[in-house]
Each structure stands twice: as C-alpha cells, then as structure tokens.
Image: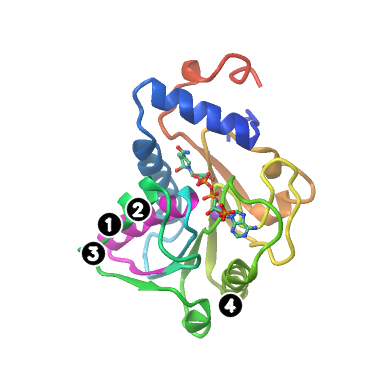
C-alpha cells in the first residue's frame, strides 16, 4: 500500500493532471475497475455469483467495468442500479458496454434480499459521498451488510459507501467491507479511527497516473 494520503479534492487534481498528460478519464476508470477486479479474482479464483451495487456516479462506473470483466470471466453477475441509470459520461459508456454480456440488471434492492451471493462489490458511493444515507442508498447498504453477514465477501471500490472521504465520518448504515481497493493514493478515511474498521484490508492500486504527474506538493505527502 502506498503511504501517500490525499483528500477528495486533491485526488480530483491528480486525476485532472493524469488527463492533461494524456491518460483519459475513461481509461483511468477502466484501470480502476480492472485493478479492483484483479483483487477480487485473486481472493475468489473459483468465481461464482457476484452482486455489483452501482450508484449513478463514477464510483458506479468502476463497478460497471468490474461487471464486464467478471461476466467475461464466467461469474454470474447481477448489477443493482441502486440510484437508477448512470449519470456521468464515463459511467454511461461503461453501462452501454454491458449490452451484449450476460449480466442481470436490477433496480430494487428488496428483490435481491433472499438471493445468495459469493461476493458483493460496493460501487455505490466513493469520494463524492456527502451527508447521510437517503432511503435508496440505505436500502442498498443494508443489503450489502446482510449479504456479508450471510457469508459473502464484500469488496468496496475506493471506500465503503456511506463514509466521508476527508473526515472518516461514517453514516448510520454504512457498508462494512472485507477488502477496500483504492486508487493511486490512500485517502484520510482509510486511516481515520472512525472509518478504518469499515474498510477491512486496504489495497492501493495503480491506475496509470505517474508519480511525476502529480501536482507539485502532493507527490511528497
Ligand atoms: N474522476 C476520475 O477520473 C476517476 C474516478 N474514479 C472513481 O470515481 C469516484 C468518484 O466519482 P464521483 O465524483 O462521480 O462521485 P461518486 O463517489 O460516484 O458519488 C457521486 C454520486 O453520489 C451521490 N451522492 C452523494 N452523497 C449522497 C447521499 N448522501 N445520498 C445519496 N446519493 C449521494 C451523488 O448524487 P447527488 O448528491 O449529486 O445527487 C452522485 O450521484 C471515485 O471514488 C472513484 O471510485 C475512478 O474511476 C478513477 C478515475
Ligand atoms: K464504494
């Protein structure tokens, strides 16, 4: 794990620098989703039934990349669009890329409550989360936590949903993960006493942003 710790705003600056150096945002999302999927496959090489809970932002987009990779690898993939259709351009692109794959899409968390899964991917909210969980998000987080209590392995994309990236404040009902795969740099929540226990193991994955591209001042943190 890299020891650099950056805030949500600094991470956006780092991504902007990556894009300016010729690494498009869509490619960063691809790299993030594939890196997280590689970590999942390393822990469950046998595959199985996989629930991927997606929000409508770019964290959900990472989950949609994972859905594509997992479906191609033979997992039985269910995508829960917990907040409706993806809204950011890169997430929309990755949603369209699922069109010809055997991925089941669902919009109702309650419909999945009784279905057993071997693994769950939490791609509901990442660095964009703020405030408390609203009803649809709370229902999706509750589903993920119940699946974990029933034995599913829970991988959080970037951070467990319901946690504030910069303060580590955990909303009531936040996701508890077995593994959190974050990207490029750790964020304050990964080490804050209030939120670190929600993360499980933490892996910081390279998404192609070279250290020398980081804005001045951030590379030394
Ligand atoms: N940028 C990049 O290049 C890369 C970014 N990457 C990934 O993107 C993630 C950041 O993506 P992001 O900025 O789109 O925010 P994200 O975490 O998806 O959440 C925003 C959504 O959540 C919603 N929402 C917020 N609070 C809420 C609440 N309380 N209750 C309910 N809804 C709430 C909010 O809705 P709104 O409040 O606007 O209505 C909005 O729809 C980052 O963590 C990493 O995984 C990687 O792909 C690498 C490249
Ligand atoms: K997440």
Depth order, front residue of 160/92:
92
| CA distance for labels 2 and 1 | 6 Å
Point out which mark residue 150 bears. Answer: 4
Contact between marks 2 and 1 (CB within 8 A): the answer is yes
Contact between marks 4 and 2 (CB within 8 A): the answer is no
> Which residue is located at x 62 percent, y 72 percent?
142
- The residue at which mark 1 appears reads as 96
Q: Say how many tags the image has.
A: 4
User: What secondary structure is marked by label 3?
Assistant: loop
Question: Is label 1 within 8 A of ligand 1 (CB to nearest ligand atom)?
Answer: no
The picture quadrant where one finds residue 79 is bottom left
Question: Where residue 42 sits: x, y (%)?
Answer: 42, 53
> Which residue is located at x 41 percent, y 57 percent?
86
Of circles 3 and 2, which is in front? 2
User: What secondary structure is marked by label 1?
Assistant: helix
Residue 140 higher or lower than 26, as above or below: below
- The residue at which mark 2 appears reads as 92
| CA distance for labels 3 and 1 | 10 Å
> Which residue is located at x 71 percent, y 55 percent?
131
| CA distance for labels 4 and 2 | 32 Å
Of circles 3 and 1, which is in front? 1
The quadrant of the rendering that contains the N terminus is top right
- The residue at which mark 3 appears reads as 101
Question: Where residue 149 sits: x, y (%)?
Answer: 62, 74
Question: Is any atom of residue 2 visible in this view?
Answer: no
Mark found first going from the N terminus, 4 or 1 = 1
> What coloring was used for the rendering?
rainbow
User: What secondary structure is marked by label 4?
Assistant: loop
| CA distance for labels 4 and 1 | 32 Å
Mark found first going from the N terminus, 3 or 1 = 1
What's drawn in magenta, residue-wise?
A: 59-79
């Amino acid at each position: 794990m890299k020891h650099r710790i950056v805030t949500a705003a600094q991470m956006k600056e780092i991504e902007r620098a990556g894009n300016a150096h010729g690494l498009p945002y869509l490619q960063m999302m691809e790299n993030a989703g594939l890196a997280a999927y590689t970590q999942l496959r390393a822990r469950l090489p046998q595959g199985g039934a996989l629930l991927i809970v997606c929000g409508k932002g770019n964290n959900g987009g990472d989950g949609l990349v994972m859905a594509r990779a997992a479906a191609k690898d033979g997992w039985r993939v269910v995508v829960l669009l917990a907040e409706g259709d993806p809204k950011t351009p890169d997430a929309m692109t990755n949603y369209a890329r699922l069109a010809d794959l055997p991925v089941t899409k669902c919009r109702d968390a309650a419909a999945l409550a009784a279905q057993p899964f071997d693994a769950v991917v939490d791609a509901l909210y990442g660095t964009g989360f703020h405030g408390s969980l609203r009803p649809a998000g709370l229902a999706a987080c509750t589903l993920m936590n119940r699946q974990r209590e029933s034995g599913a392995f829970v991988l959080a994309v970037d951070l467990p949903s319901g946690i504030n990236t910069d303060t580590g404040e955990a909303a009531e009902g936040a996701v508890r993960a077995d593994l959190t795969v974050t990207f490029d740099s750790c964020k304050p929540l990964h080490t804050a006493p209030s939120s670190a226990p929600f993360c499980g193991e933490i892996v910081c994955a390279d998404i192609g942003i070279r250290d020398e591209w980081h804005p001045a001042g951030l590379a030394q943190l």
